[in-house]
Image (cartoon, helix red, strand yellow):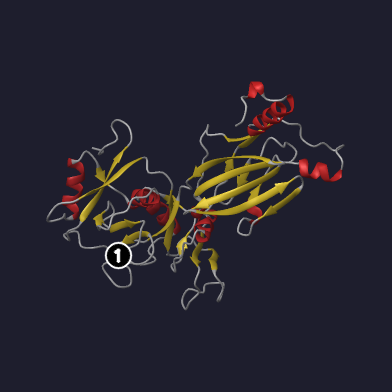
Amino acid sequence: MLKPLSYASPCMRCTLLSWMESICALSVSIARHPPVRAVLSGTLTIPCHVTYLRPLATSTTAGRRAVLGEPRVKWTFISEGKEAEILVARGQKVKVSKGYGNRVSLPFYPASPTDATLVLSELRSNDSGIYRCTVQQGIEDGHDLLEVKVKGVVFLYREGSTRYAFTFAKAQEACARIGAQIATPEQLHAAYFSGYEQCDAGWIADQTVRYPIHTPREACYGDMDGLPGVRNYGVVDPEDMYDVYCYVEDLHGKLVLGTAPDKFTLEEARAHCKELGAEIATPGQLYAAWNEGLDHCSSGWLADGSVRYPIVTPRERCGGSLPGVKTVFLFRNQTGFPDAQSRYDVYCFRGEGPGSGVAD
């Protein structure tokens, strides 16, 4: 049986005390305040700070001992229960994993070995997940975690009656009218690298016309023949007619599904939302809510007269095998909104703060 510490030999006391000190000889912490901001195509900064209770190796430390004494920094990404390496750094040597390329850096390490802050640029939707900062010095290590949600979604918007109906000015107005803004080239590229594909040419904020394709096929080659990528028609006459790619980031409220046994016409749908102290939602608000996790396999009216429903988890009879906001079109060529006398559920929106309900 072990003796109490007070009766242990001097040698044993020294060994035990050294072991206890090593438990907290290195600590790692990710700052939570202010909260990190992560938006599509933007830059994410995750501050990771390290406290060492033992001296670090210096330039005068001998060879191999100096190398082994340098802290080893590792950042990993956890999503759907799987952990993948982002980068590993020790001193001046940095190994960046495939898929991160020029997007990731440690701006302060190794010049400041106590600062393992990670910077990740050109954010994509699939950069949402848990980030782990791990620092090792000798046999000691520590880590901390931070969950990140990349906000923002790019989507194609089409006029209710026909395809390719917007001039550049009308395209900008259309995005604003539905609670969004015209997407930038950077946002469309980030959406493409997040998996977005759409074989429809649409206006972008710089007056170019583009569309994202992962699976090249006839009528979707654009300027890239058989290669995947974002097709680009270049700067186009502002009076030419196309669809438009819109972007929305924040919901600024809550979106709810309104229903009734006989459903609603468009006019009845507006009235129902008003009775709830809300207003009929815009497509931009529905996309923002979908981006935040809203999932309903129920087609509902929106403010522009379209009928749509948000699917996060694809399932049978809910719009196919891919997640997204599904649209009910009148015609097989994906044009036309349903007749206003048709009957559907309705998506209502209630804004944040006092006086944020229905406008007079």
Residue at 48% in and 53% down: 81
Amino acid type at circle 1 is Ser
Residue 51 visible in this rendered orientation of the protein: no
Occupied quadrant, residue 133: top right
Q: Classify mark 1: residues with Cα within 10 Å, few (<14), some (14-19) or many (20+).
A: some
Q: In which quadrant will I find the C terminus? A: top left
Occupied quadrant, residue 142: top right
Residue at 51% in and 44% down: 38
Specify whether 250 is left or right of 84: left
Question: Camera-side residue: 94 or 341?
Answer: 94
Residue at 17% in and 46% down: 272
Q: Is residue 336 above or below residue 360?
A: below
Specify whether 348 is left or right of 107: left
Q: Residue 191: horizontal and vertical position, in percent?
A: 49, 57
Q: In which quadrant will I find the N terminus? A: top right
Residue at the bottom extreme, as displayed: 218
Q: Residue 290: horizontal and vertical position, in percent?
A: 36, 52
Residue 74 visible in this rendered orientation of the protein: yes
Question: Camera-side residue: 63 or 184?
Answer: 63
Question: Camera-side residue: 333 or 131?
Answer: 131
Q: Residue 278: horizontal and vertical position, in percent?
A: 24, 41
Pointer 1 residue: 161
Q: Is residue 153 above or below residue 237?
A: above
Q: Residue 83: horizontal and vertical position, in percent?
A: 54, 53
Residue at 38% in and 60% down: 323
Q: Is residue 355 above or below residue 72?
A: above
Specify whether 215 is left or right of 308: right
Residue at the top extreme, as displayed: 6
Residue at the front extreme, as displayed: 1
